Image (cartoon, coloured by chain):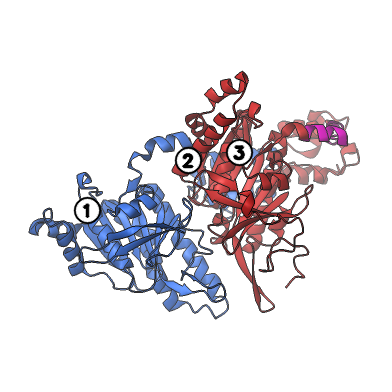
Chain colours: A red, B blue
Amino acid sequence: MQRAVSSYPFAPSVKVKLLNAGFHSAADLCDLRPLQLSKEAGISQEEAVEVLQAVRCEPGQERAAASQLTALELLEREQELGSIVTFCSALDTALGGGLPVGKTTEVCGAPGVGKTQLCIQLAVDAQIPVCFGGLGGKSLYIDTEGSFLVQRAVDIAQAAVEHCGLLAEDAEQQESLKEFTVETVLSNLFLVRCHDYVELLAETYLLADFLAHHPEIRLVVIDSIAFPFRHDFDDLSQRTRLLNGLAQQLIQMATNHNVAVILTNQMTTKVWNGHSKLVPALGESWGHAATQRLILHWEGTNRLASLYKSPSQTEATVRYQITAQGFRDVPHSNQPKASVDPTVSQSGSMSKRPRMEEV
Amino acid sequence: MASKKLRRTGLSVELCDRLKRHQIENCQDLLSLTPIEVMRLAGQSYQQVLVLLKSVSQSCAPSMTTALEVWKQRADLCFSTSLPGLDRLLQGGLSRGTLTEVTGPSGCGKSQMCMMLSVLATLPKSMGGLDSGVIYIDTESAFSAERLLEIAQSRFPDYFSKERVLEMAGRVHVFRELTCQDLLNRLKRLDEDIISSKAGLVILDSVASVVRKEYDTSLPGNLAHRSNLLGQEAATLKYLAQAFRIPVVLTNQITTHVGDGGERGAVSFTGGNYDNQEVAHQGTDPGLQPIRVWTGFNYNLMKDTCAASGQLKLL
């Protein structure tokens, strides 16, 4: 009850009038009727009602009661949510079953390494029916670069449908296969093309409503988040502010609507101490935005995926390949020791901590 | 839609005036602020600001579609390059609505390929063309009208009679831009040119030459400036490709990348993330993303340009 009036989300003019009238904390305002308040503070009657409702309902206490979960309940909830497979079993194991639903993941990599492929694969995999171990949900693909090619999505969808067809054993699976065709996969893949950062921000503001209207959506892909923010900004601090706001909104959406959010980032060259290194773009502070970070990189002709940051999994580097069917494992005979020890890769790179001290 | 004026988004007039006093006139200005800043400038409460931002977002957000609808419209999604091997590689041909980059060392035939594509674009649809005009932006003065006519007449001697050849030449609009700023200005105005010349193909030959002339990347700050410029160019071209659903072809030069071995495109658009397809011409050199695994393709330059020889090699 001692909360200061200036900390409430009222309009600035209303706050000024309340403070001038001598109301400094919430305790001063309780037990007042709207008409009295409006006369004393000089605000309109509607504003007075708004103020009193905000002060009275004490959302702080209610929210605390509602979000008081025990870790056990959280564990059950997380297990219910499931994850989205990537069809590369090594990567799925490293991620702890697949891409986690309810969290944001960032995928960084040099051009051509397979980020968009992974995103399209996940957009298809999110739709795998529940009886095959999938989520049976829909996907939203926000494309800012124009790299979404529908032909590729068709190929990947076809391969996924065939794969499930081979696995189908009992009647239930056969039944659900009828719903899981290339056509339905494509029709459940929503596509938005944003041409600049303003459209991306606008889309994010509308995303919460969209997800509320389409509760079956389980995956939101933003490919890529770096492109619109990299070349149009002179004011870098504004860019950081906008990116932080964006990251917050995405995390909120991931938790409130039970979706997995995956963002693609580009790499930039950082020159420092006479060496140059490839680091994820958008700056250091953006590194804190996503809950998990996956870095895709080359080593010779091999493609490697490193789990760089994760709250629950250990760092690991796995090999993968991109085939005509999509994102896949490298066949076992060629698989080197999928190292859990992150000291591979002499390019001095992204699979090792600490990051700044290494040369 | 970013530059849509706030007045047209359905906001009240006093609110628009109030925001105008703080130099917030269009959607871009408003959405670039955080909600707390908007609270202060618009004088509204937090909840009201969220509603305000949502309504402004609705008026400038892009429309949503599904992959199925895009797939249904794919029928005329490709522009055949007339080289069956290359078409197979590109899964039908040059994709409409995306950028394609043609890279290679000097003298290997990039400008020749561009000229051939120009001829093809003016052919009627029954012959695999686009039956449209062509916009050719030449930064290296490599475009030769005589060569264009020679290609047309050698490749399609039956179709291109005297008048037809001249008519074809009249549909290819050539712009010579020799500095970076000129090029950028031209690109910004290109949508008007595309509409007035009914262009179905845009060729930019080459991206690298102006930039390499003007920016010495060993000087500090130049690299960022150059990347910025390239970024703007790429974004404009992508937008044009997508909005008009036409193929856009760029050529790039090759530079040797010391350390890794191998060669790369000279000018990579901030990490090469800007192109959708890359076709490297070097006899057998690889390059393709994001559709296929690395493949190679042999070709020959002849009088009628780029007749295919040899087969596809998978690398």
Q: Secondary structure at mark 2?
A: helix
Q: Is residue A63 magenta?
A: yes
Q: CA distance from mark 1 to mark 3?
A: 43 Å
- Residue contact between numbered discs 3 and 2, judged by CB atoms under 8 Å: no
Q: Which mark is residue A155?
A: 2
* Residue A218 pos. (x, y %): 64, 35
Decide which of tag 3 and tag 2 comes sooner along the chain: 2
Residue B293 position (above or below residue A81): below
Q: Is residue B12 visible?
A: no
Q: Secondary structure at mark 3?
A: helix
Residue name at image x 50 percent, y 29 percent = A181
Chain bearing mark 1: B
Please tell me how crowded label 2 is: few (under 14), some (14-19), or many (20+) other residues with Cα within 10 Å: some
Q: Secondary structure at mark 1?
A: helix
Which range is magenta? Answer: A60-78
Residue annotated with mark 1: B122
Which amino acid is tagged 2? Answer: Asp
Residue B199 position (above or below residue A29): below
Chain bearing mark 2: A
In the image shown, does B242 or A127 lie closer to the viewer? Answer: A127
In the image shown, does B303 or A328 lie closer to the viewer? Answer: A328
